[in-house]
Image (cartoon, rainbow, N blue to C red):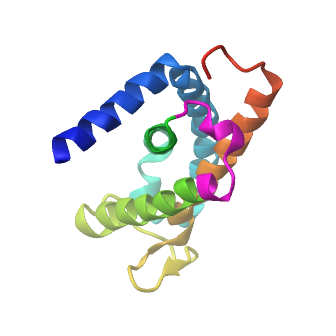
Amino acid sequence: MPSSACESAARAVIDGLRQGSLRIAAGLFVIALSLSLAWEIAQMPAFGPAGQSLGLGSCAVAATWDAAAIVGLYLWGVVWTGRADWIRTAGTIGYGMLVGPGLLLGILAEIVAVHLLAWWDYRPSMPRIPIVQVGLWPTLSLAVITPLSAWTAQWVLALQPAARGT
């Protein structure tokens, strides 16, 4: 029954919040925001005039959206594993839960922004993914930054004693 599945997912998130996932999510957000902002600024020259006219403010907005998506993927892991600290020991499956959806989100975001809304375009120097004709660098951002953020969060969490209940 769909409502019981929704209730179970909601309970998992609430239990995760009680176990410290909010603290982990906040730290992950800061890490992801920093990495994403650097990525956005680095790829700016590969965007055409429409993309460059948006400036650093658009980089900050895009980085914030990316960081929020990364936290969303982490919370999905909380629901999936039932553990707030799953990221401490994320192995191949854990990273797969981050990279796969991150790649799909990147492709969908670029399709919408470039083809449907025409928010930006690319210079010839931007490599494109042939089938969907979207830029490779912005598509890869979530697929690269998400596991890098998770790895950094693992490293930071390893420096801290496990919180009670996690």
Magenta residue check for 88: yes
* Farthest residue, direction bottom: 130
Compared across the picture, whether 99 is left or right of 61 comes to right
Compared across the picture, whether 81 is left or right of 111 comes to right
Q: Nearer the viewer, residue 147 or 119?
A: 147
Secondary structure predominantly adopted by residues drawn in magenta: helix
Q: Nearer the viewer, residue 41 or 87?
A: 87
- In the image, which residues are magenta? 83-95
In percent of width and height, residue 140 lies at 56, 63
In percent of width and height, residue 114 lies at 34, 66
Q: Nearer the viewer, residue 37 or 158?
A: 158
In percent of width and height, residue 147 lies at 64, 51
Which quadrant of the rendered structure holds the C terminus?
Answer: top right
* Farthest residue, direction right: 159
Q: Is residue 164 above or below residue 56?
A: above
Name the residue: 55% across, 30% down. 84
Q: Is residue 50 above or below residue 29?
A: below
Name the residue: 49% across, 36% down. 82
